[in-house]
Amino acid sequence: MDLINNPLLVVLAGIAIVALIFWYVATEIDRRKRNVGTIAILLVIGLCLAAVLPFEDKLKGGIDLKGGVAFTVEIQPAEGNPGQPPIPVGPEAIEAVKKTLGERLSAGSMDGVQMQGVGTDRLVIEMPDVNQAEADRVRVIIEKTAQLTCKAVHPNSNSLAAAVASGSQIAPSGWKLYYLPILDDETRKKIDETPILLAKRNIVTGDMVQRAIPVPSRFGMIQVTLNSDGGDRLFNATKQMRSGVDRMAVVLDGQALIAPVVNGNLSKTFSIEGLDGSKEVNEVVAALANPLKNPLQILSTNQISAKYGEETLRQGVAAGLAGLGLTLVFILLYYRFAGIVALLGLSLNILILFGAMAMFGATFTLPGIAGIILTIGIAVDANVLIYERLREEMAEGKSIAAALKASYEKAFTAIFDANITTLLTAIILLVMASDQIKGFAITLTIGILASMFAALLGTRVFFFWFAGTGKGGALKKLSFMSLIPNRTIKFMQMRNPAFILSAVLVIGALATITMKKDTARGIDFVGGTILTIQVDAEHKIEASDIDTSLSDITLTKKHYSQKEEITGGDTDLLKIKISEMDKDIVQAELRKDFPLLTEKNAEGDFVTPISVNTIQPTLGSEFFISSLYALGVGLLAVLIYISLRFEFSFAVGAFVALFHDLIIAIGAVLLIGTELSMIHVGVFLTIAGYSINDTIVVFDRVRESLQTKRGSIIDVMNLAINATLSRTILTSATTFVAVLALYIFGGGPLKDFSFAILVGVLIGTYSSIFVATPVVYLWSKARGSNLRRELLDANLASEVNPAQK
């Protein structure tokens, strides 16, 4: 029996795990903590293994890793009766469209479709493992509303229609101009078209179609049978027409197909011809069987070849393994035996992450891989916080058991606060951001929760088993490497030079943002098309060759070409940014000038396909506005949390450091010529979370030191910054190395992501030491307040209020 396919067992297991965690937290007896925690860990491991095995069946890759096509469609209001406004999209529209399209695609042997509603009137449709021809078929199926109507032909259409088409006369009231195909007498294929005037009022509508079947003996013909209501309406309408004189037209999705002369009263069965072969006949038959009440508009198309997807997956896996490997080597070398425990905790973290993704049916995407690598850095941060506290406790002469207990208790607040702020940004991304970066938000959210479980409970239980729960533990001593000198650096006295440096960086970043504001947004925010061609090493095509090829044609907008070399691979990527209106003519011109792009394999697929990513300008504008909202709400949520958790002076310091880091990071990204995309929204919120994370760890120690140590405020702040310096540098170094692997081994999108994160890590580390704490000091001094007294009063109030309650 598949455990994960049994929702009841999954729910019961989840309840049991939550109950065990509460029991673990509540009990004060170490032996009981160890046993309860062990059961919780084993239950989590079992549940995750059941969810994730076998890997090839349970872990789903997105189209950016497997290849395929994705459409974002908008449900349009249905056409109302003549003279009436369109019928607005109702709340049931998304489910109705999903059902209809699912049946159409299944009828067309297009399996594996994934559809997800977005808002009240949008749908994201993904189909992995489809080639160019299949992607084109999917587009046709989506756009075919299958609204079949029968309309009366104007009595004087032959003379009036031509005049209306030429513009010399307007259409009479109640009539509309259409174009009727002219078919070859023998082949019955379209050879031309002629204008025709049809009534706006419908005789029969598509919802009256009972059945539609192909006519095998006739090219492009189907037979349509109406229901009783449709048959009655057709009979009554033709009864009033002049036999042998008046005509009636059949219209499908706004295209007139036939307009025969009415000979007698028609019943509920008639035939339609003029379709382009058996493939279109089958698609129309399937569409008529599942008509859409609302037409669909395709807002964006992202078509990725399987070849490109495979290369992207290879890059992502290589970057992930490199980042993970370097991190693990560092932990083992620096923390030795404790590093083995951290390795066990990190393994538990990754298992929970993959298990949860499989359990909830989440899809792995390229941004998701970036989220996994960032999760590794977050997990290492928690271990470093605990181990640096452990180093201090052992230095005071405590036993291993006592030092472990104290280090986990003292590190809990900093770990909790730091992870909660990052979790807030991840959840806001998940709720507010577009589908493009939801994969990043999902993996980051699960990864944060997993890292807290693995670090605070998992590694503690492992230490319980190694060190024992009393004096008789097997582990008597722990030794760590030390790279940070044990002396007090007077960071607070360096605040003036640091502020000058920060001012220069911020002003430079603001100047860059101002100069590049018109060219900073990529197609995610302004719309357009990017064509991507993956070229093998033996076939050299340069960006200049693309420019020369496209110089022969007239484009609606200027194009931009660039070449990317793939690290560790034997291929190059060519990217061409063009207007959405030019994508067909550009692809045709490229295939004409480069024979490589016309070669096909035995299955009829292009050997060197062109991946297409198209976004309509209206959708790009909406993405930009929603991204600003997501960024603003995310920052506001983080700042509110800091204001609630810390005194106001600390909140001011966090605000200044946060905006300092974000402005410099944005300026750095624009300075190297990168265009902002949806992934950068996730990046900047992640940088905000990382910046606050670093700042909170320092603030937590500053607050603790001010309450427990004597001396001037500046001296105590220096002691606190130095006490956390080892953690700050180690965490930044491990995160930097992991993300650096992503930058080195990743492709274009991963490089854009990782570069911004690298800048954020560096500037966040700098600001937590040289900006945040000095601002706290200067703000409290400017207000004339005693920061130590504020902290002591707040601590006293927190102890008195619960007692009064």
Image: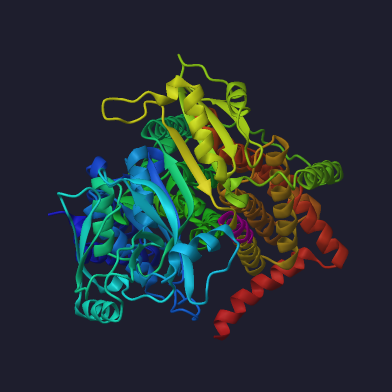
Q: Answer with left or right where residue 181 lies relative to residue 263.
A: right
Q: Which residues are magenta?
A: 619-628
The picture places residue 407, in percent across and down from the top left corner, at: 51, 51
Q: Of all residues shown, which one is farthest toward the top? A: 538
Q: Tell me if I can see residue 66 in this picture.
A: no
Q: Tell me if I can see residue 347 in this picture.
A: yes
Return the residue nearer the eye: 110 or 641: 110
The picture places residue 685, in percent across and down from the top left corner, at: 60, 53
Q: Is residue 524 above or below residue 639?
A: above
Return the residue nearer the eye: 730 or 124: 124
Q: Of all residues shown, which one is farthest toward the left? A: 1
- Residue beneath the point at 79% across and 46% down: 506
> Residue 191, located in which quarter of the rendered image?
top left
The picture places residue 613, in percent across and down from the top left corner, at: 50, 43
> Residue 707, located in which quarter of the rendered image?
bottom right
- Residue beneath the point at 77% across and 44% down: 509
Q: Main secondary structure of the magenta part?
A: helix
Q: Of all residues shown, which one is farthest toward the bottom? A: 805
The quarter of the image holding the C terminus is bottom right
Q: Is residue 84 magenta?
A: no
Q: How is the image coloured?
A: rainbow
The picture places residue 253, in percent across and down from the top left corner, at: 38, 62
Q: Answer with left or right where residue 625 lies relative to residue 571.
A: right
Return the residue nearer the eye: 550 or 203: 203
